[in-house]
Amino acid sequence: MSERFELALTTYNIGTPVKANQAIGLGWKTAQPVLANSLPKWELKLGAGQMLPFNLRDGRVGLWSYGQASARLPILSTRLMGGISHGPANLFGRHTTHFIGSIEQPLTGLGQRIGGPVGAVIADSALVAEWFSGTHEFGDFVPGVNWHNKHGWVVILGYKFSNKPGRRDDGVIIEIGKTF
């Protein structure tokens, strides 16, 4: 909707094998700059969001809420984020409150050094990793890469490592988005 406010329509656990918590959610998120005048190089932000997931298997509706704080390390341009999330049973398998964290390292400099069309794609990309603590349905560590181009397209590719014993839920993550 704007540079600092986003609406989303998201599917969860759509695939095989069929899971009890397949859902589609409508939600929003925002990230607002803080102390931008006094600490501009740190790009401090406070963020929040909510999703209203509708479980496609049993029709239950829940509310997922989260809040986070993030900062960019000035010399490396690495963004670090930490926060808290509260998720409903119809999406997470049980009601859960847990830590969320992520790290993002832009590849702008590498892309510029490579140059050409390949360098341009790399320059618009970042290495990312996120972690949801706990052994609920979304308790995962997900390293990957994201790509944001100047036309509003976003592609995220990652691999999730489940926090659950036996790690039967490991798998590929693909997200595609478009800013209008």
Image: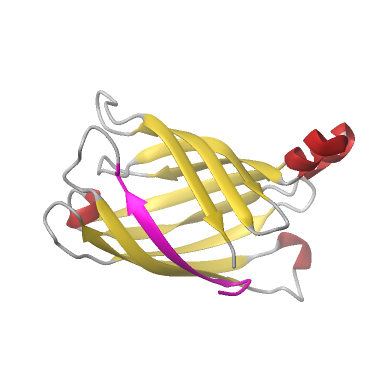
- Image point 34% across, 53% down: which residue? 11
Instruction: Check the picture and name the quadrant holding the C terminus.
Output: bottom right
Q: Is residue 24 left or right of residue 174?
A: left
The quadrant holding residue 88 is bottom left
Q: How many marks?
A: 0
| Residue 50 appears in the figure | no
The x, y position of residue 141, in whole percent, is: 42, 37
Q: Is residue 26 left or right of residue 20?
A: right
Rendering colour mode: secondary structure
- Image point 20% across, 48% down: which residue? 21
- Is 8 included in the stretch rendered in magenta? yes
Depth order, front residue of 145/165: 145
Relative to 149, residue 42 above or below? below
- Image point 64% across, 73% down: which residue? 34
The quadrant holding residue 165 is top left
| Residue 6 appears in the figure | yes
Relative to 149, residue 63 above or below? below
- Give the magenta range: 1-14
Relative to 44, residue 103 above or below? above
Depth order, front residue of 37/25: 25
- Image point 57% across, 58% down: which residue? 178
- Is 140 included in the stretch rendered in magenta? no
The x, y position of residue 163, in whole percent, is: 32, 34
Relative to 64, residue 18 above or below? above
Depth order, front residue of 162/101: 162
Depth order, front residue of 10/36: 10
Q: Is residue 7 left or right of residue 22?
A: right
